[in-house]
Image (cartoon, rainbow, N blue to C red):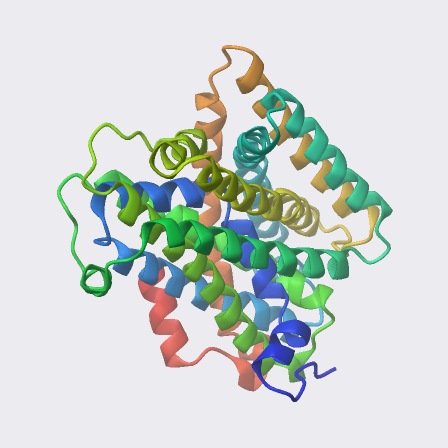
């Protein structure tokens, strides 16, 4: 079922894109916003090149995931079980679920910060509200993939408009911006630089792109469209992060005493410099970013878990909904504990980081192996350019 339509880029964006934009929405969240802001606020434009590289790696892996979804007649972890053993698919599914579930608390805290900034209502209630909205969408929708695609396109559009409006306050320094594409590591930038990769380059999300391509009902003949979709979707991820980094560079770089360790500190710093309107605009974009990754992130964990265990991974079937619900509730409960008690989420972060150390190499190897397997991909197997970029990213 070829999906690419004539009529130029706008029609392509509306009709033929989808899976990679949803993948990008998983990655653009509170963590990536804070990390990009710290990079710009503390080091100016110096780490733009690193953002570009991590986005390029993400594009290569999303390209592979989407095209595997197009070319395979079975789910990606069903293929994994058949080719490499059920234990490998279980390992990939469980580790991916743990990464998603324990990092889901960050999406809850991000949406709580944003909505409190917009409404003044206490942060504690927002994880409950947005988890409830997500569960309603999950169980009431009759075509969950289509709903996700439309919603994510709208939310990404809102993010772009909001963060561009913030950039209007700060402006951009063109010469310094262009110099940022020259690789360098300013003194003291190690922690921020290391943080940019996991908040921009998510191999788990790239693996889930195979599910999304099949959710859109793409087939082998749509593999070319899937490649273009990967380029457009991950470019939007890069563009949004670049706007945020540039805003922080213009607003905060070179200024003393400004804390950018959380979304709340970031919105407060913007308000201190540019007034309440800048804070409201930022919180609006933050809310869109947090909610865009809220449900899709949980669905990625739930979908990969049930796929790894050999159950039906279809979007509208009960196993995926149960797995997604588990991820949503774990994230909500951790966030509520962090907001109302002295609970320190360090333990859950350590669990998520340990799962990441396992999930990332497993998922990356699976994508590389399957994308280069002629029995799966036929003539659509990886070429040397994609393999080269993916190999460096690995």
Residue at coordinates 57% horizontally, 13% vertically from top-left? 340
Occupied quadrant, residue 6? bottom right
Residue at coordinates 77% horizontally, 44% vertically from top-left? 321
On screen, 384 above or below 167? below
Q: Nearer the viewer, residue 287 or 167?
A: 167
Q: Nearer the viewer, residue 281 or 354?
A: 281
Image coords of residue 224 (percent x, y): 57, 82
On screen, 276 above or below 18? above
- Asked if residue 206 can be seen in this view, the reply is yes
Q: Which quarter of the rendering shows the C terminus? A: bottom left
Q: Residue furthest left?
A: 187
| Image-based side of 183 in relation to 290, left or right | left
Q: Residue furthest bottom?
A: 6
Q: Which quarter of the rendering shows the N terminus? A: bottom right
Residue at coordinates 31% horizontally, 55% vertically from top-left? 171
On screen, 326 above or below 393? above
On screen, 30 above or below 222? above
Image coords of residue 195 (percent x, y): 34, 43
């Amino acid at each position: 079922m070829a999906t690419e339509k004539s009529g130029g880029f706008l029609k392509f964006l509306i009709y033929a894109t989808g899976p990679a934009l949803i993948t990008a929405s998983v990655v653009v969240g509170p963590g990536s916003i804070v990390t990009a802001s710290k990079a710009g606020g503390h080091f100016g434009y110096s780490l733009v090149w690193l953002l570009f590289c991590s986005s390029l790696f993400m594009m290569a892996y999303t390209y592979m995931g989407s095209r595997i979804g197009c070319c395979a007649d079975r789910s990606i972890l069903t293929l994994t079980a058949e080719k490499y053993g059920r234990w490998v698919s279980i390992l990939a599914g469980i580790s991916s679920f743990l990464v998603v579930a324990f990092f889901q608390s960050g999406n809850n805290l991000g949406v709580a910060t944003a909505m409190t900034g917009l409404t003044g209502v206490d942060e504690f209630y927002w994880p409950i509200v947005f988890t409830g909205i997500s569960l309603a969408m999950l169980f009431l929708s009759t075509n969950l993939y289509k709903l996700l695609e439309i919603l994510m396109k709208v939310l990404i559009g809102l993010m772009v408009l909001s963060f561009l409006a913030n950039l209007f306050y700060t402006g951009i320094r063109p010469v310094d911006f262009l110099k940022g594409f020259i690789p360098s590591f300013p003194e003291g930038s190690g922690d921020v630089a290391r943080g940019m990769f996991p908040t921009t380059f998510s191999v788990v999300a790239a693996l889930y792109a195979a599910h999304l391509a099949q959710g859109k009902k793409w087939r082998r003949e749509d593999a070319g469209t899937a490649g273009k979709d990967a380029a457009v979707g991950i470019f939007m991820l890069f563009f949004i992060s670049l706007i945020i980094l540039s805003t922080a560079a213009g607003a905060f770089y070179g200024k003393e005493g400004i804390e950018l360790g959380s979304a709340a500190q970031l919105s407060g710093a913007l308000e201190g410099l540019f007034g309440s309107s800048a804070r409201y605009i930022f919180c609006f974009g933050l809310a869109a970013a947090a909610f865009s990754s809220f449900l899709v992130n949980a669905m990625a964990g739930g979908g990969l878990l049930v796929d790894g265990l050999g159950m039906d991974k279809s979007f509208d079937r009960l196993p995926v909904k149960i797995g997604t619900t588990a991820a949503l509730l774990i994230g909500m409960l951790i966030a509520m504990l962090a907001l109302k008690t002295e609970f320190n989420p360090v333990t859950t972060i350590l669990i998520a980081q340990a799962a990441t150390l396992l999930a990332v190499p497993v998922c990356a190897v699976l994508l590389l192996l399957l994308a280069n397997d002629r029995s799966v991909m036929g003539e659509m197997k990886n070429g040397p350019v994609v393999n080269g970029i993916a190999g460096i990213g690995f």
